[in-house]
Amino acid sequence: MGTALDIKVKRANKVYHTREMLSGVVVVSGKDSVQHQGVYLTVEGAVNLQLSAKSVGVFEAFYNSVKPKKGKLTPSPVDFTVTPETLQNVKERALLPKFLIRGHLNSTSCVITHPLMRELVVESSEATIKSIELQLVHVETCGCAEGYARDATEIQNIQIANGDVCRGLSVPIYMVFPQLFTCPTLETTNFKVEFEVNIVVLLHPEHLITENFPLKLCRM
């Protein structure tokens, strides 16, 4: 009889879900001594996908859209200025304190493996600044001729300044895209996956200023 190797997991039904820990033991049986330099486990998965006549076209469109696109990416740098006058959807603009914020993004067309960078400067602000944050937002849009539904979810928040920052001081912007929650921008006839970044400034006492920038993500 030769050497036998058996993998025994603690869960009897051997069914595990995302983020659950797979645990167990590896049992090596044999009459003779066995030399080894370690035990390596490789997990293979399989998907059984059944498509109906109605869904096959949607699946093909989705598959063709998410395939990595290779080529040159044209940088699209952005200079921005934020004042009470530039804000959108503000009902009581006259009640806002006066402020002037300038900044620059290296590009809104981004490679997922490269960070979003550059800087912003608080030129002036009548109110005390509590914090400045970067919010990365995942936006899904789906629907048909009858109507579309749009769902936006914050997937990352980075505080780049805490407290009343010095006026005229350059505050670095640096955001690494999280690999588990981002993908290339996808757009089909009935389905879109997009990303946006918000620069959020919180002023005393409770004024929230948001500047939004749509992003286009891709793989190179």
Image: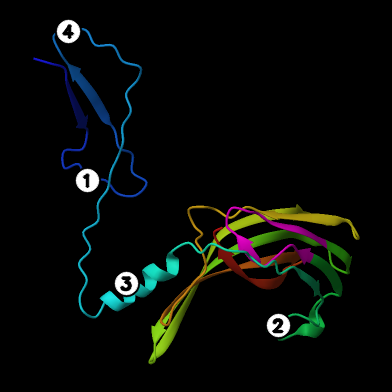
What distance separates the C-alpha of mark 4 from that of mark 1?
34 Å
Judging by the rendered image, the residue that carries numbered circle 3 is 59
Q: As drawn, is 219 to the left or to the right of 135? A: left
Q: Which residue is mark 4?
A: 32
Residue 198 visible? yes
Q: Nearer the viewer, residue 19 or 38?
A: 38
Label 3 secondary element: helix
- Residue farthest toward the left in the current orientation of the protein: 1
Q: Residue at x 62, y 52 (%)?
A: 176
Q: CA distance from mark 4 to mark 2?
A: 77 Å
Q: In the rendered image, which quarter contains the C terminus?
A: bottom right
Which residues make up the magenta segment?
A: 104-120
Amino acid type indicated by mark 1: Val
Label 1: which secondary element: loop
- Identify the mark at residue 106; answer none if there is no mark: none
Q: Decide: marks 3, 4 in contact (CB < 8 A)?
A: no
Residue type beneath disc 2: Gln
Pick whichever, 59 or 197, lies toward us: 59
Q: For the view shown, which residue lies furthest in the bottom direction?
A: 146
Give the answer, above or below, for where 8 lies relative to 64: above
List x then y, in percent, for residue 23: 29, 33
**Residue under the point 74% across and 80% down:** 87
Taking depth in this image into account, of 136 and 37 the one nearest to the observer is: 37
The residue that appears at 49% across and 57% down in the rendered structure is 181
Q: Which residue does the numbered mark 2 point to in the structure image?
A: 88
Specify whether residue 112 is painted magenta: yes
